[in-house]
Amino acid sequence: MKLEFLKRFIDSPRGEKIVGNLAYYYLKFVGMTTRWQSVTGVKETYEMLEKYGSMIVVGWHGRTLIMPYFWNKERPLNALVSPHRDGQIIVHVLAKFGIGNINGSSDRNSKEAAIELMRNLQQGNSIAIIPDGPRGPSMKLTMSPLFYARKSGKPIIGITYSIAGSKIITRSWDNMLVPLPFHKGMYAITEPVFIPQDATDEELEKYRQQIETTLNDLTWKLDKAMGLPFIAQGKEAKKSRR
């Protein structure tokens, strides 16, 4: 009975907000107490924003928790977030980090979400897409970010991190990395990739592989430095039974 009441509370708008706020304060605490051994690419990213106005940010589903930590609230960023319950909790977390949201899904972009993403880029707002969500395959890049980059002319950057002592939820399809406070950490942003507006489908696939490989190699490099086990790509969420 108590568990059912708790579930109903969490599913309510008030519960989503409270859970989201608690998650934010925990992640903020982790970020503040982490002994950052290196933070790569953040300064260069803001310098690039001054030049290009906006960009497309990508990162893996299993590495989303600390991704927003170093984002400057003064630079508008809106993330593509699922309209489902878990997504709404994420909305509250992002809002505390100064990041907005666009309702949608990276594997099922509605026409409205696609239009809103492009509008944001054109208006000088960066967008964030988790290209292996919401069900995988993990650490596999979809074409979605490349389509927006080709049409808008905006660069794509990848964000990843690793924190020693983190708990890896191996039963989850994304092998979610849950960081703990008071450990060493490393945070990195990849160099930007620009997609020519006349790029063919074959060329798009080469760019896709390049971005995916770069982000994965960087993630594995940071994990090795932090003493974490190797996490293979390609895991998918189990289909729900009907």
Image (cartoon, rainbow, N blue to C red):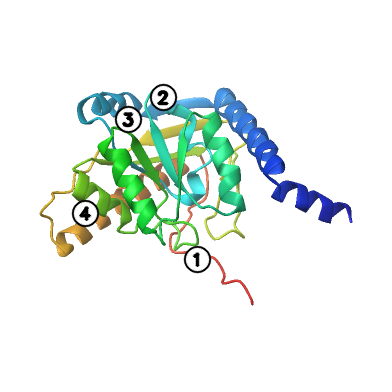
Q: CA distance from mark 1 to mark 3?
A: 30 Å
**Where is residue 154 shown, x and y percent of the image?**
22, 40
Name the element at disc 3: loop
Residue at 43% from the left image edge and 42% from the top image edge? 79
Question: Which of the two discs, 4 and 3, labels the residue nearer the N terminus?
Answer: 3
Q: CA distance from mark 3 to mark 2?
A: 13 Å
| Quarter of the figure with residue 33 | top right
**Callout 3 amino acid:** Gly
Against 228, is 29 above or below?
above
Residue at 41% from the left image edge and 27% from the top image edge? 38
Q: Which residue is mark 2?
A: 72
What is the crowding at mark 2: few (fewer than 14 residues within 10 Å), some, or many (at least 20)?
A: some
Question: Which of the two discs, 1 and 2, labels the residue nearer the N terminus?
Answer: 2
The mark closer to the camera, 4 or 2, is: 2
The mark closer to the camera, 1 or 2, is: 2
Q: CA distance from mark 4 to mark 2?
A: 28 Å
Q: Does 61 sit left or right of 33 as displayed?
A: left
Residue at 63% from the left image edge and 75% from the top image edge? 241
Q: Which residue is mark 4?
A: 207
Q: Which residue is mark 1?
A: 236
**Callout 1 amino acid:** Glu
